[in-house]
Each structure stands twice: as structure tokens, then as C-alpha cells.
Amino acid sequence: MAAGVFLSGARYVLGEQEVHHTELPGLEAKAAEYGLAVNAGLWGWGSVFRTERGLDDLAVEAGAKTLRACGIDPGEVDALVFCCTSSPGPPEGHGSFLRGVLTRLGLGDIAVYGVGMGRCVNLLSGLDIATALVTTGRYRRVLVVTTDRVFDEDTRITGYALFSDGGAACLVHAEANGEATDGAYELLGCASAQETASLDWSSEISSDLAKRVNEELLGPRGMRTAEVDALLHANIYLPLLVMKERQAGFGTGQLDTTNTTRVGHCFAADPLINLADREASGRTRPGGFYLLASSVPGSRIGVLARKPGGATHVR
């Protein structure tokens, strides 16, 4: 990937109703259904965030936060990559839905790229697309937004995560474009690995696919997995998360599981939420390497980012 492509203004929004896991209806029945011991500390059960707002409201709020953080006018955005697991209504309504999002964000007549069907890797697919569009010079500024919520409360508790409603956004842009530099990360590469035979939801998450992504991202740079400052992963149940990522070569010190308990699993938004929180809490360093990654059965996507400044070589 050519140098000079950046991710800035990572921001997110959560549902307005914080619900402790003990208040979720049917928790014990669901735990029994999935064979889970009712042990919050084991799984990382904490709070989830629920909303009555629409997907468009979450998308607009997240996107507006990013534009403000980057200090740019909406008219300076060239394209929108919109990521969503649940298509909002029948296809006949998609145009008016996107029109509302574009209009409320002040984006005008720009290109829109829709990303779906990837489940919880949708955001990282969107980042890959946005990075390619900027790298090739097609656009200079691309707003990436992901938004999702639970519509059937019976699906909020699953065998691998407690789901929260929310959205997240960031700006992918060319170097020296006038954006605010606080919270900017150089995008060094995007990689994906897929095993078509395992795409069915009944399959397990594969640590082998994660290893393939690591090798594609880190190998050409002469880096080892241990040289990544932090893995910004999906906020799924702790035993599953830790086991699979340790098998992929990451150490426990590279995993930050705080948000698994604090906010739960926000669909595809988790890696960006975790990056935003890490930056806001001062737990990034100039020259540090951060890997945004997420897996679903049969698929793994990773995006390697470096915070500008500091030494240019790996540690």
C-alpha cells in the first residue's frame, strides 16, 4: 500500500439505555440454551446499550462526531462507505434512507458504497474499500460509517456475545489534507482471509485465518505479532476471544478486554470503538502499531495502523 493514507476522527455512539446483564429478560434460559454457566466474570458479561432510535439516527450522530473531530466541512467529503448488517427495510426504501443520512450529514451528491452481508467484519471491509479508493487517488476523503441495532430482543443474548446497539465512524483520507491531526493513524495495510466452506454460521471462528491475515500484514514489514502494540478486536465472550487470539499468536498484554464488559458487542463497530477509547484514554504512543481485526466463521479481516511520530522502525 502506498504511504500517505490516514484514518482520523474515530468516534462512536451507543444506545441511550444502559441495561445491566442481570436485567436482560431470559438471561438464565438463554444461558441454558447455549450451555453457558451463569458466571458473569467468566464470560465478561456487564452492560449492554439499547436504543429505540433508528439506524439512520445512529449513523448520522456517529458521522457528525467524526466530521467535527476532523474539523472539516461536510462538503469536503468525497464519498461515503455505509456499513450495516441489517438492511433498513425493503429495497424500495433504501434510496430514501440513504438520502436522509446524506442530507442530515450535509454530504450532498457524493458516491455511496454499501457494505453488508459480512456480519461483524462489515466495518473492516468498509475500511478496506475506503483505503483502496484513497490510495488509488479516486477520492481524497471518504467517510466510513457503521450502524446496527438489535430489532428482536430475543437475539440480544447469543452463545458468543451480548449485543449492544450503536454506530461508529471515521474519515479515511490522503496525507496533508487539512484534517485535524489529533487521533490520526497511518493505514499501513488491509488484509482478508476466507475459507468458503466454513462461512456457515454453525462453523467456528478460525485462528488459522487470523494467522494468514497477520502474515500478510506483518510479514512484508519484517514484523512479528508480538511487535503490535495492541489488537483492537471484537468484544465477544472472553474465553472465546482470548483462546482464538492467543492461538493466532497474540499475547494477553496485547488484548484489551475492558469493553467486552463495559459496552458488549456492538456488531462490526467494536474495533473502531476500541481504538477511539484507547486514544481518548492516552493508551497509544507515537510510532505505535495497532491492528484492527475481527472474525466471523469463514472470514477474518485486519487493518494495520500506525500512530505517526516516534521511531519509524518496529520495536
Image (spheres, rainbow, N blue to C red):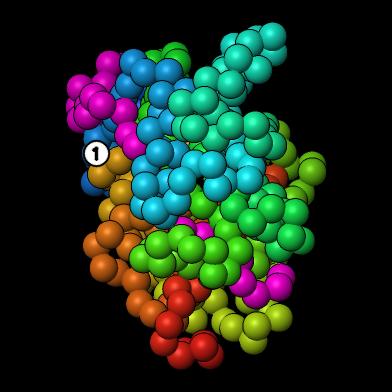
Residue annotated with mark 1: 46
Crowdedness of circle 1 by 10 Å Cα count: few (<14), some, many (20+)?
some
Is 201 colored magenta in this rendering?
Answer: no
Q: Amino acid at mark 1?
A: Gly
Tell me the magenta residue range.
1-26
In the figure, is residue 191 to the left or right of 274?
A: right
In the figure, is residue 271 to the left or right of 32?
A: right
Estimate the x, y position of residue 195 in percent, counting from the top left: 76, 49
Is residue 59 in view from this perspective?
Answer: no
| Quadrant in the picture for the N terminus | bottom right
In the figure, is residue 26 to the left or right of 5?
A: left
Is residue 58 in view from this perspective?
Answer: yes
Quarter of the image for residue 131 reads bottom right
Estimate the x, y position of residue 246 in percent, counting from the top left: 48, 65
- Vertical order, 146 against 231 (above or below): above
Identify the residue at horizontal 65%, vertical 51% (top origin).
Answer: 130
Estimate the x, y position of residue 61 in percent, counting from the top left: 38, 33
Identify the residue at horizontal 43%, vertical 82% (top origin).
Answer: 309
